Amino acid sequence: MVDAAMRALGYYDDEDAIVVEKQQSVVKAIREALSKASKTGKGRAGYPEFIVTSPDTPDIVVLVECKADTAKHESANRDKPVDFAVDGVLHYARFLSPRYTVIAIAVSGTRSSNLWSFFLMPKGETQPKVLVAPSGAEVDSLIPMDDLIRAASFDPMVHQRRERDLILFSQQMHEFMRNEAEMSEQEKPLAVAGTLIALSNDVFARTYDAYPARDLPDFWMRTIKDEVSKAKIPVSKVNNMTQPFTAIEVQPELSKSTHAYPKGLLSEIVRLLADRVLPFMTVYHDYDVVGRFYGEFLKYSGGDGKLGIVLTPKHVAELFALIANVNKNSVVVDPCAGTGSFLISAMMQMTKTATTEAEITSIKKDRLIGIEQRPSMYALAVSNMILRGDGKANLYQGSCFDTPNINAVKKHKDSSGRILRPNVGLINPPYAKSKADLSELRFVDNMLDMLEKGGTGVAIVPVSCATAASVEKQTILNKHTLEAVMSMPPELFTPVGAIACIMVFTAGVPHNVANKKSWFGYWREDGFVKIKNLGRVDRHHTWPGIRDRWISSWRNREVHPGESVTATVTAKDEWVAEAFMETDYSNLSQRDLERVLLDHALFVLKGSQPAETADDD
């Protein structure tokens, strides 16, 4: 019965894509995990009826246990693995879950009368949960392998564990590149991005291992150029984008054959990224993998003291797209694009509102615009968009203050030649390190001037931009309307101590003409906690609920004591919720007092110092 169902759903159509094994496994790690999984508890190996794997998703295993009688489907306590299907498959799943995320399927009965149960045991867990499809419905019948994997992948615990594994792997990759390949901090992210582009080429992915160490860098570089050319990027941009990768091609250590790595270090880097990162990217399209690696590499160099780079956390990039309420009709610009995470988040949110393939194509091809000044970062941004098959032709290298780039944005045209001026701007500008540097608000003003009248601009800047009087604040209000300011968590950019706030503007409408109150949100608690070696993570899975409450409150301009307030402001006022909120002191606790004192101490020590800087990923 199970065999027939799998055949009907294509499990046997492509042995390279799906491997179905009966009571055995050719995968060494699975054999080792089940070596003492006998259901009788006698320490011998045990195997379920079917073990199903997909080489493209090596961290997920599907187990199927069958019984001929529906009366033997599940025991009351699930503690009789020999006799019951559910008990048996969960027994095997617990042996595999330390290494894999397991989809456990129990089947009982005949073709005419049968029962199916679908469970998920995320990696590192021992207790099963019901497998739920991305739609929210419980899986209750066999579905194609791709759909099973998708259902498991979007479970919050699975997603978080995969993200954690990716971060840990990025740390290992940093050590390998530093210790073995002797690569600089600037070279490491380029090696990652270039390799991911090369691996998107089927010929390279299948044959790179056949090349000797001395020849692989040349093959790697030629493949990158081929893939960039396929992306239909203007020739001038191709040269700008690919030039930084040539430093990797000629890196002397990468082309050496050693006893430990006879194929060379570049071959080992390619293998590691193919095994550990490519599967992640094929599932989580909204995740800025290149930016994540860049951020991890940056940590170990102590940050970029000259450029002042602090990466935008993924959940903040997601938040920006929701604050701006982007949709399929939006045209989004990021004048400090970095690795492109704002554009990626906007793209994912925009495509959710699309109903046709033509609309999705328009979003990816015509409605995402970026500017990035640094050559290496520009290469990373273009790489990021190429890996998603979109947006790369609308990325410009140079300063966002350069007239040609400003005009290119304002006169941006879609594929049919129709002008599509941006109506949404998203920016995390370089944070000023001294009075000689450009104010962060100069970048914000520049971004707002690029938008069509009535467009929405969202920026994350140091809280000092909001609290201190400045010429830039007045300049912005003379042309644009301050809609909202949200005070963000003090440790948002950990390990860097930049304290930030989000500002939201309506472009092209002077603040005094709009003549309305601004909304201020106290968004200091996002549910993330610091974990050693991982940074801030949503350990307790509270972020989605917090995010949705924040966005609902902002969109409806809700006022809640201690959380949000509205006020009429000028350039001379402090643009933060703390300046206007009324607090119900009767509910204050000792913990609240300690938190406020800590926030104040952090502000005094860090927020008022311009030494901490940030830049959009």
Image (cartoon, rainbow, N blue to C red):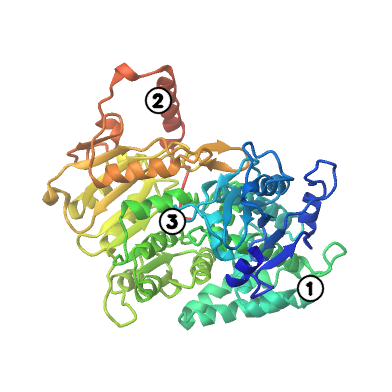
* Contact between labelled residues 3 and 2, with CB atoms less than 8 Å apart: no
Q: What's the distance in space between the residues labelled 1 and 3, CA to CA?
A: 47 Å
Q: Secondary structure at mark 2?
A: helix
Q: Secondary structure at mark 3?
A: loop
Q: What's the distance in space between the residues labelled 1 and 2, CA to CA?
A: 57 Å
Quadrant of the rendering where the N terminus is positioned: bottom right
Q: Nearer the viewer, residue 396 or 420?
A: 420
Q: What's the distance in space between the residues labelled 2 and 3, CA to CA?
A: 41 Å
Residue pointed to by mark 3: 135
Give coordinates of residue 486: x percent, y percent: 32, 41
Residue type beneath disc 3? Ser
Q: Which callout, 2 or 3, points at the residue further toward the start of the chain?
A: 3
Give coordinates of residue 69: x percent, y percent: 65, 52
Residue 213 is labelled as 1
Residue type beneath disc 2? Val
Q: Residue at 27% of width from left, 31% of height from top?
A: 579
Residue pointed to by mark 2: 596
Q: Which callout, 1 or 3, points at the residue further toward the start of the chain?
A: 3
Q: Is residue 168 above or below residue 373?
A: above
Q: Nearer the viewer, residue 300 or 96?
A: 96
Q: Tag 1: Cα neighbours inside 10 Å, few (<14), some, or many (≥20)?
A: many
Q: Nearer the viewer, residue 193 or 436?
A: 193
Give coordinates of residue 111: x percent, y percent: 60, 63
Left or right: residue 449 compared with residue 443? left
Total tally of numbered discs in the picture: 3
Q: Nearer the viewer, mark 1 or mark 3?
A: 3
Left or right: residue 136 compared with residue 536? left
